[in-house]
Structures are given as C-alpha cells and as structure tokens.
Amino acid sequence: MEVREAFGKALRLVRLQKGQTQEDFSIVSSRTFVSMLERAVTSPTLDKLDDLCSVLGVHPVSLLAVAYVYKDGGSSADELLASITEEVKMLLAATDLP
C-alpha cells in the first residue's frame, strides 16, 4: 500500500474512533481537504498534520504509526514502535536530549 493511501486510512480510522466528522476539522481545515486526505488525493504538510492531530487529540507520531502499520501490511504496532524507539534513541545518543 502506498504511504498516501495508508495515511488516508489511518486518518479516517482515528477520526471515526474519536466520533468526529470531517466538518469537525473546520477550525483547522476544510471538509474538502480532509476528504482529499482520506481518499489519498493529497498529503498534509507537517504543520497541517499537527493541526489535524490537535483536533483528533492524538500525537502526530501516533497517527503516522497507524499509517505505517497499514502501509507495511504485516508489521504489528509493537514491532513498529520497538523499531522506532531504538532508532530515536540511537539518533539522539550524541545529543544532550534525554
């Protein structure tokens, strides 16, 4: 599955699980744009991703993780999150961040 399609499926899944309509995003986006995202017509910018997730009440990384579980089509959330955790630790190891 292509990443754009996977993101659209993830956005729709989370939106429906949260009991929200596309119109509920009107403070950050148009219903048409949300529909286009869910139908994989377009992709969000990082700023728009952050805005959408603020409406959903989820961290952007959570939405992206769901999208990549869909995209990879076989990996579990646990496997993906374990891999991400190790990568982030390795990438931040040379910094003064925790």
Image (cartoon, rainbow, N blue to C red):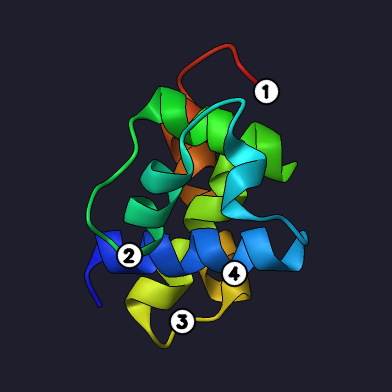
Q: Could you tell which of marks 1 and 4 lies nearer the N-terminus?
A: 4
Callout 3: SS: loop
Q: Nearer the viewer, mark 1 or mark 4?
A: 4
In whole angstroms, how far apart are the C-alphas of marks 1 and 2? 38 Å
Residue for badge 4: 13
Badge number at residue 75:
3
In whole angstroms, how far apart are the C-alphas of marks 3 and 4? 18 Å
Residue for badge 1: 98
Residue 54, position in %: x, y? Answer: 67, 32
Q: In this view, does 25 lie to the left or right of 9?
A: right
Q: Could you tell which of marks 1 and 2 lies nearer the N-terminus?
A: 2
Q: In this view, does 90 lie above or below 39?
A: above
Mark 3 neighbour class, 10 Å CA radius: few under 14, some 14 to 19, many 20 or more: few
Amino acid bearing label 1: Pro
Mark 2 neighbour class, 10 Å CA radius: few under 14, some 14 to 19, many 20 or more: some
| Point 48% across, 31% down: residue | 29
Q: Could you tell which of marks 3 and 2 lies nearer the N-terminus?
A: 2
Q: Is residue 53 above or below residue 36?
A: above
Q: Can residue 58 be seen in this view?
A: no
In whole angstroms, how far apart are the C-alphas of marks 4 and 2? 12 Å
Amino acid bearing label 2: Arg
| Point 64% across, 62% down: residue | 14
Q: Is residue 8 above or below residue 31?
A: below
